[in-house]
Image: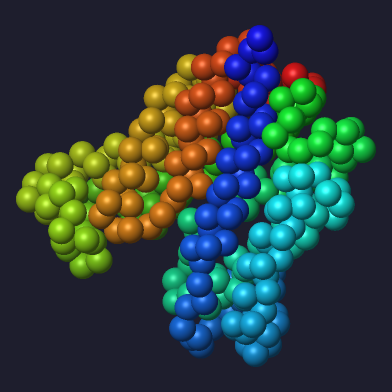
């Protein structure tokens, strides 16, 4: 019987595929607004193209078709790049048409980019497997998992540090979170009612969120911290989902895989013992 680590790569790849499909169905064009500047690399396009519903529908179809071909290893690596390109256009259209910056898709996008590059570099080797489901026999480069992991923890730390530098420590008072919850939170949610009813609870949530976000980069060196940080960050996202309805399922899935599960696999994988100066191929 193969060790659990032999199947982790398959789980990671198919989780990425599932997130891409989920967000492809989830996204929609927002009301066309007057933009002050471009928000994405396609922001230079004229509005009639960028906000085209026909283009948006075609890109959704292209993602599904490209992913179907990719899963069955048909037309590699073209099918991988078709999926990535169509998903990129969808994300750009969605973000440019929104009245606020949407950042719930970013880890799914980065994971897709990394898996696309892997298939491009190794497509001759990978196409010998009839489908992506047989990748448990593949050789997985360490960067395939490290890049999304690095991106994940660095963006968490950046988010936490920005909250502090922009708002100061005075923002951590419980009341500010209660105001946000009252203004845009789901009034019927149990989490909302708990937050509004107790300033102490709101304060503790703010403190724990900022501590785990700001210091997430420590997990790059202290691997024993990863499962605890993963559980804490998952809890934060579930709370956000219950109160505000922001679907950070990409973060939740990757927190669970890269921060909780992967380090627990021990020696069957290499990320739990990662040394940034050494990038070897792991089985």
104 horizontally vs 275: left or right: left
Height in image: 276 above or below 64? above
Residue 229's image quarter?
top left
Q: Residue at x 48, y 44 (%)?
A: 251
The x and y percentages for residue 144 are 71, 34
Q: How many marks do you count on the picture?
A: 0
Q: Position of residue 183 (x, y in %)?
A: 21, 67
In the image, 232 versus 165, the foreground residue is 232
> Which colour scheme appears in the figure?
rainbow
Q: Where is residue 130 drawn, in percent x and y?
A: 81, 36
Task: Please determine whether, in this image, residue 100 is positioned above or below residue 130.
Answer: below
Q: Splitting the image into 4 quarters, where does residue 58 fall? A: bottom right
Q: Nearer the viewer, residue 271 or 66?
A: 66
Q: Quadrant of the C terminus?
A: top right
Residue appearing at x 53%, y 58% in the figure: 23
Q: Residue at x 86, y 38 (%)?
A: 127
Query: Where residue 138 appears, x then y in whole percent?
Result: 78, 26
The answer to whether residue 77 is visible is: no
């Amino acid at each position: 019987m193969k060790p659990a680590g032999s199947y982790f790569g398959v789980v990671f790849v198919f989780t990425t595929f599932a997130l891409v499909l989920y967000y492809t169905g989830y996204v929609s064009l927002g009301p066309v607004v007057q933009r002050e500047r471009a928000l994405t690399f396609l922001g230079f396009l004229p509005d009639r193209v960028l906000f085209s519903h026909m283009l948006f529908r075609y890109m959704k179809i292209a993602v599904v078709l490209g992913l179907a071909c990719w899963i069955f290893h048909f037309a590699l690596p073209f099918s991988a790049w078709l999926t990535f390109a169509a998903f990129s256009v969808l994300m750009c259209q969605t973000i440019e048409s929104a009245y606020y910056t949407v950042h719930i898709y970013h880890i799914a996008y980065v994971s897709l980019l990394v898996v696309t590059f892997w298939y491009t570099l190794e497509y001759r080797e990978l196409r010998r497997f009839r489908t992506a489901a047989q990748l448990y026999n593949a050789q997985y480069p360490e960067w395939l998992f490290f890049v999304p992991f690095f991106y994940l923890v660095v963006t968490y730390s950046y988010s936490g540090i920005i909250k502090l530098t922009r708002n100061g420590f005075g923002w951590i008072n419980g009341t500010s979170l209660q105001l946000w919850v009252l203004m845009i939170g789901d009034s019927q949610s149990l989490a909302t009612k708990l937050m509004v009813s107790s300033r102490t609870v709101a304060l503790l949530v703010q403190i724990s969120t900022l501590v785990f976000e700001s210091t997430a980069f420590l997990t790059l060196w202290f691997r024993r911290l990863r499962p605890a940080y993963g559980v804490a960050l998952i809890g934060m996202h579930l709370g956000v989902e219950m109160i505000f309805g922001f679907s950070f399922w990409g973060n939740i899935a990757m927190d669970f895989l890269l921060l909780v599960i992967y380090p627990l696999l021990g020696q069957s994988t290499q990320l739990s013992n990662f040394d940034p100066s050494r990038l070897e191929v792991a089985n």
